[in-house]
Amino acid sequence: MKHFFLFFLLSCSIYGQSKYPQDYFRNPLDIPIVLAGTFAELRSTHFHGGLDIKTQQKVGLKVYAAAEGYVSRIKISHYGYGKAIYITHPNGYTTVYGHLQKLSNRLEEYIKQCQYDKESFEVEVFPHTEELLIQPNEVIAYSGNTGSSGGPHLHFEIRDNEERPMNPLLFGLQVKDTKAPYVSAIFAYPKDKNAIINGNNKRTQLRLIPQKSGDYTVEEITAYGKIGFGVTSYDKQDLAPNNNGVSNIQTIYNGNRSFEIDFKRFSFEETKHIKRFIDYDYFKTKKSRIQKLFIEPNNPLSMYKNVNDNGYILVEDSTANVYKIRIRDYHNNETWVTIPVKGKPETIVQDSISDHTNKSLIYSDKTTNLNSGLVSVNFYENTLYDDTYIDFKVSSDTLFLHEDKIPIQKNFYINYDLSNYKTEHLNKIFIANLHGYYKKPSYITTTRKGKILSAKSKKFGTYALAMDTVAPTIKPINFQDKKWLSKYRYLKVKITDDLSGISKYRASVNGNWILMEYDYKTNTLIHDFNDNIVKDTKNELKIIVTDNVGNSSTFEAIFYRK
Ligand SMILES: [Zn+2]
């Protein structure tokens, strides 16, 4: 028995990549880990920073500290991680727990004190090292669905001592995964105008041929010059149908390593460059993410390694070549794609020569200002990845600023000069992004300096002015005016705004601020009488809700408690 145990320990340190502590962090739930999302999987504006652990479609599961340590940060926000706890451990790593329903009694008491002190539901605090010590296996919270979460789950992260998220599975957490990744599409890309793929000089989808083994080949392609490839791939774990991300992709050209991306760790500064990693145009058109297996200029992602000539291959005349893609999940299940490439110069079929008339050139490394009518748009250095011709047109107050198909790395600035506007509601006007088929206006944060309105954005598209003169609505959900609410645990109201959206709210009872938790997904504000703030018999409730252009509504009611 003793020997067996020793052997077990030994094998852990051999196979468990002893670089990272194994068996230090426990599963933060007391059910087996089933993943709805893997580390670094592709999201719309970022790589996923942790694991999304399923909670059996329920909220309220006990969440355990993954190891002892101290609470170094608590953040409560309407969006993002919702209610989130950060625990820093003696070994230097920090674990993060997001979308929590509520914290443990001790932590809940601590954060409510902060919320009442600041008179705000949204708070962010950084307790001292000695303040909130956490014991091994301590229940720190209950799982939930708060913030920008699309269903009950626990978002769990492990960050290194430089705040960079790492794949928590590197630390030995167990997930059952015996299935290899699968591939849904393969593309070839010309590097420049001299490269040819099957007679074309554009992105070309290749026909995948699945093999019995689970691997794939494609029909032989003819090519010439420098080309790269792209792949759409996912991984499924054993116990869930979710299409999750893979953990490593390598390419090999004629037996030599050409490219690798290893999704082990990244920094939050670089995560936005996912727009450069995926084919953004294809994603916006087809809603599917092609991972580019080559690196274009201005791509600072740190997850690449063993890259030769930026991942491009050089195909020469009359050569027979083999390009292979090896896709792995974290458990080293792997899938291969084999692409035979025959070198053959061909005359390029030109379907359209790009026409730049009526387009504006935005340099990637210079400031560019566009002006027309009421509108000016400012692009600073490194807003775009490449020098790009874009559509820019202003018609009345509508700004047509290309289509959202080009990745943008930094904000550009839109300004409207309303000096000649004569309307009594000038201060109710905001800049809206018009989106979707019906060009629905949505508020973007608009600042005002005299008669100049400004907003920033990272998305091309159509913008226009919109006016909101209607104040938010406030309706009680579970009570009525002048009633006894002695047996009630919660006070619930519904708040909505038709156009610019809710910016802030304030609730008080007999003049004292009360905490009301806001859930934007259900438009509800909820006060918990267990906060013990409401102690009088007769209570005057007052709630003020303000929208993003400053229209505000006040709701008043009286209730009794004993
Ligand atoms: Zn998550």
Image (cartoon, helix red, strand yellow):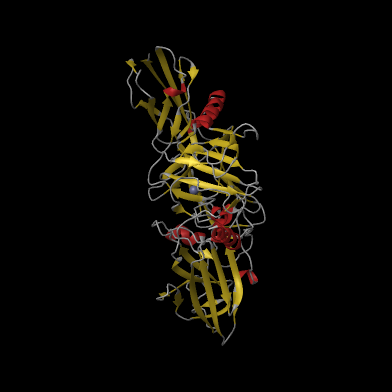
| Residue 204, above or below 131 | below
| Residue 254, above or below 63 | below
Residue 275 position in % (x across, y down): 55, 57
> In this image, 194 relative to 493: left or right?
right
> In this image, 421 relative to 61: left or right?
right
> In this image, 93 relative to 155: left or right?
right
Residue 167 position in % (x across, y down): 56, 54
> In this image, 98 relative to 481: left or right?
right
Q: Quadrant of the C terminus?
A: top left
Residue 243 in view of the camera: yes
Name the one closer to the observer, 120 or 332: 332
Name the one closer to the observer, 39 or 419: 39
Residue at 51% across, 59% down = 280
Residue 247 position in % (x across, y down): 53, 61
Residue at 34% across, 27% down = 477
Residue 238 position in % (x across, y down): 41, 60
User: For the view shown, which residue lies furthest in the bottom direction?
Assistant: 318
**Quadrant of res 376:** top right
Name the one closer to the observer, 14 or 5: 5
**Quadrant of res 213:** bottom left
Residue 121 in view of the camera: no
